[in-house]
Image (spheres, rainbow, N blue to C red):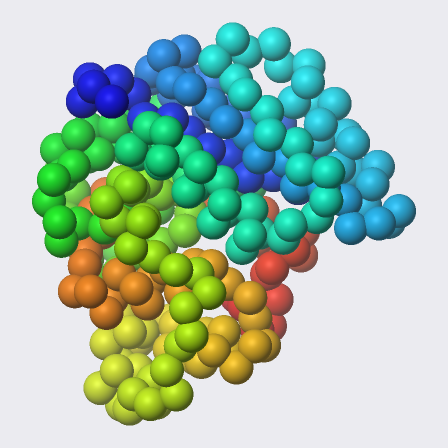
Amino acid sequence: MSPNTNAPVAIFVYRRPAHLRAMLDTLVRCEGFSETPIFVFSDGAKGDHDRADVLAVRELLGGLGWRNLELILSPENRGLKRSICEGVSAIVSRYGQIIVLEDDLHLSPVALSYFNAALSKYATASRVWSIAGYMFDVPQLRQRETAFFLPFAYPWGWATWDRAWNQFDADEKLPHEGLSTNSFRHAFSVNGLSNYANMLKMARDGYIDSWYIRWYYKVFMEGGVSLFPPVTLVQNRGVSGGSGTHAGTLNP
């Protein structure tokens, strides 16, 4: 696609219409929204207990009337890992790049401009695997005016290219050796930022089913980096309160 064309946005949703409405309100205020292809992947219900919520999400989506919107409505419950992996693969095969959002994120008005500028600038930089929209609140960075790289990846609003995503296999078997060494655990946990090494081990042993920790592991093992803004351009408003399907004691 043309480097001057806005990257498509893929939004993955399930059963939280209130969160989704709030997120969409921030998305439409973003610079470049009207020129951006928007794809919403709506996961299906698991059973009678969540069917009404899924239908409420789809009613909300059906009433948007956006000309740049395409809805992909799953008749079954695929779960977040399968939805993300299949959806991202479908979009990057068509457009070569993607911006990925979930239903509980709030975007800065400049978020899409940032993602698109970074996707264009680093399109052929093979060591750059992703563009992150979220950044932890670091006092020393608040006055910084430029983005920077970390050997890390983060799932709260991110972007990538087909050249990176096509190297990733979410079902690849994780090794039993090496994940418990002190040097690996320290580096993979970003020098103690959070216990990502333990999360990876739980994914390997089948306690959690996370696409993200496997994606980060792939980036890490390939010596890849992600671009991060100095202050966050994305906020997650769905982790607290227990509304997130995958948030919990094993997957903070």
Horizontal and vertical percent position of residue 233: 34, 37
Q: Is residue 54 left or right of residue 67?
A: right
Q: Is residue 182 left or right of residue 70?
A: left
- Rendering quarter of residue 131: top left
Give the quarter of the figure containing the N terminus. Answer: top left
What is the number of callouts on the image?
Answer: 0
- Residue at (17, 49) in percent of width and height: 128
Q: In this view, does 231 lie above or below 139?
A: above
Q: In this view, does 109 lie to the left or right of 10?
A: left
- Rendering quarter of residue 216: bottom left
Horizontal and vertical percent position of residue 174: 40, 77
Is any atom of residue 20 visible in this view? no
- Residue at (60, 59) in percent of width and height: 246
Q: Which of 169 and 114 is in front in this view?
A: 169
Horizontal and vertical percent position of residue 183: 22, 86
Q: Is residue 154 above or below residue 160?
A: below
